[in-house]
Image (cartoon, rainbow, N blue to C red):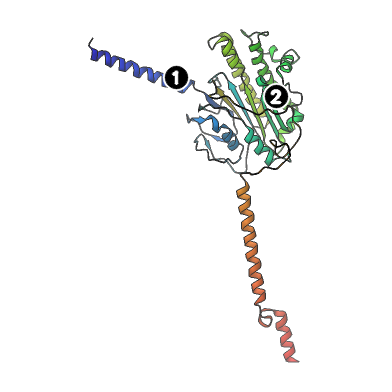
Amino acid sequence: MSLSGCGRMEAVFSAVFLLCFALNAGVHGDRLTVLQSPEFVGFQKGDWPVSGEKIPDLVALTMGFSVQEDLAWPGLKAGPLFQRPRANVLVVVRGVDSLALPQSVASYPLENPVPFTMDSVAETVHSLFAEDTPVVLQLAPSEERLYMLGKANAVFEDLPVTLQQIRARLSQDGSVLASLPLNSLSRSAEADLLFLSEVQVLHDITALLQRHRHLAKDHSPDLYSLELSGLEELSRLYGQDSPQYRDATAILASVLQKFGQDVYGLYGNSSVVEVVTVKTFEAPLTRKSRSILESKQISNPGSPYNLAYKYNFHYAVVFNIVLWLMIALALAVIAIAYNLWNMDPGYDSIIYRMTNQKIRMD
């Protein structure tokens, strides 16, 4: 074979390899999957990528809140103005790029998977519905990180927080160990117990919500943000081709499917449940720790002096309403005063006109 023929064959093989790589990356990349969503929250089916740093803005828009920067993403269309979901549940799964979730509303590729938090959305919920005390729950069992606000302090008071508490919960009545097909997973290995502990937390959250069904009937939206990293530990310890990792992936997919259906039903088919699957984050997340079971209600959770927020993105709207209303009232007062000052009692007032005629007749 000539050199030119070898070069052409090499070019063909390179093109086929790049095509297969592109297809594999498109199918197996990090994903944002919408498990449940009401009809008035319009998620469009398609392969439009969404950036990881825009996930908080996307959650805020699904809850009917405004964002500082417009989200130019065609996957979510504008919904009705006076109708919003009662809850939004976001589950972040680390250590896997995708899960087999067949019963989902839509799924989108995730690009730029940087760490993010729901702090901005939680502050918006608290500032707009402070009197209604909505449920705000942010939980990461592997890091023993918990932040609760509003009614969550009373509802999830018995929720196991530390890994020691969760592992003790696995040996009690109602544990998921009695109902899950563990297969290759062990009840004594640390990584396996971490994964099973996160599954137990999902089960306990739905159990507590079923016990407190009144939460789904109030007028304030609830926010849940959960971060699960058990699969990441299993992948690091056993590898992605291990039977432990495959069994854990299948169990988590089944548990998340049921978790989304239960939450969706508890909130009267008016909640949004999303699952973000991320293989690895591109940068570590530096986060300021918060006290567990925080119950003190303050207007600004980030300020120890109970100060009000310096700026709110609704300030411009309120300022314009007040400003132009004051200008309109001032112009009305000036016009009324001018007309009264230049009024002729003899011609403009019927009282003085009648009096003047009576005097002339006398």
Image quadrant for the N terminus? top left
Sequence-wise first label, 2 or 1: 1
Q: How many marks?
A: 2
Q: Tell me the tag on residue 210.
A: none
Q: Position of residue 102 (x, y in %)?
A: 55, 22
Q: Quadrant of residue 141?
A: top right
Q: Quadrant of residue 60?
A: top right
Q: Secondary structure at mark 2?
A: helix
Residue at 55% x, 31% y is 53
Residue appearing at x 63%, y 19% in the figure: 255
Question: Is residue 352 positioned above or below 91 on the image?
Answer: below
Mark 1 neighbour density, 10 Å: few (under 14) some (14–19) many (20 or more)? few
The amino acid marked with disc number 1 is Asn
Q: Position of residue 352 (x, y in %)?
A: 72, 82
- Label 2 Cα crowd, 10 Å radius (few <14 / some 14-19 / many 20+): some
Q: Say which mark, if any, is on residue 24.
A: 1
Q: Is residue 40 visible?
A: no
Q: Residue furthest bottom?
A: 362
Circles 2 and 1: CB distance less than 8 Å?
Answer: no
Three-letter amino acid code at the position of disc 2: Ile
Is 188 above or below relative to 50?
above
Percent position of residue 138, x then y: 67, 28
The residue sitting at the front extreme is 305
Decide if residue 274 is in sight here: yes
User: Label 1's element?
Assistant: helix
State the image quarter where residue 348 is shown: bottom right
Q: Which residue is mark 2?
A: 205
User: What whole-number distance in Å separates the C-alpha atoms at marks 2 and 1?
Assistant: 36 Å
* Quarter placement of the C terminus: bottom right
User: Residue at 69% across / 79% down in the picture?
Assistant: 349
